[in-house]
Image (tube, grey):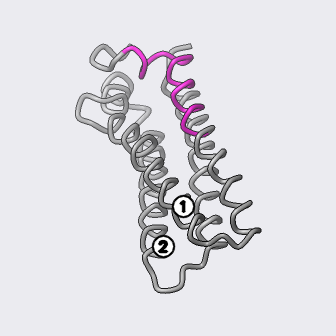
């Protein structure tokens, strides 16, 4: 179905495993952040939030960029089935939202007095968007 895309990106089980690993890693970080906020360990919390942002950018966004490449999953999917155009546009919007939230997190964290609860809320938003996005993508684009 998607000849130019690597095997891990076009097969349901392996692609789902990539998504699940990203989500699992992000969710684990959130729990640690909540505990640090409760203990008011702000310096360590700031480090954990920075680590979360790096994780999102290094795993989730890099994966998204790969899917959006010229010969990536999305381009090939639409080429093979033009009826997927709108769905792919929605999936790209999900990626954009995660990028925007990661940028908001960097801005807030770099401020004079970061709102750590808001930063954790932003992190949760990334997870929610990513989880919905992953399931939509798997259902619409991957070979089962």
User: Quick one: SS at disc 2?
Assistant: helix
Depicted 46 relative to depicted 96: above or below: below
Depicted 62 relative to depicted 143: above or below: below
- Furthest toward the left, the residue is 70
Which segment is the magenta one? 7-23
Q: Name the residue under label 1.
A: 49
Label 1 with label 2: CB-CB less than 8 Å: yes
How many numbered tags mark residues here?
Answer: 2
Asked which quadrant contains residue 65, the reply is top left
Where's the C terminus, which quadrant?
A: top right
Give the Cα distance between marks 1 and 2: 8 Å
Q: How crowded is mark 1: few (under 14 residues within 10 Å), some or many (20 or more)?
A: many
Taking depth in this image into account, of 128 and 119 the one nearest to the observer is 119
Give the left or right position of residue 48, taking residue 80 as reference.
right
Q: Name the residue under label 2.
A: 109
Pointer 1 or 2: first along the chain: 1
């Amino acid at each position: 179905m998607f000849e130019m895309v690597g095997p891990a990106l076009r097969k349901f089980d392996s692609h789902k495993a990539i998504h699940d690993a990203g989500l699992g890693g992000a969710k684990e970080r959130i729990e640690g952040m909540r505990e640090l906020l409760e203990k008011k360990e702000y310096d360590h919390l700031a480090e954990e939030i920075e680590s979360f942002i790096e994780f999102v950018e290094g795993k989730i966004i890099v994966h998204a960029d790969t899917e959006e490449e010229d010969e990536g999953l999305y381009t090939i999917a639409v080429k093979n089935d033009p009826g997927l155009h709108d769905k792919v546009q929605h999936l790209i919007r999900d990626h954009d939202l995660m990028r925007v939230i990661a940028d908001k997190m960097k801005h807030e964290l770099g401020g004079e007095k970061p709102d750590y609860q808001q930063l954790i809320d932003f992190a949760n938003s990334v997870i929610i968007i990513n989880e919905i996005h992953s399931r939509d993508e798997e259902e619409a684009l991957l070979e089962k």
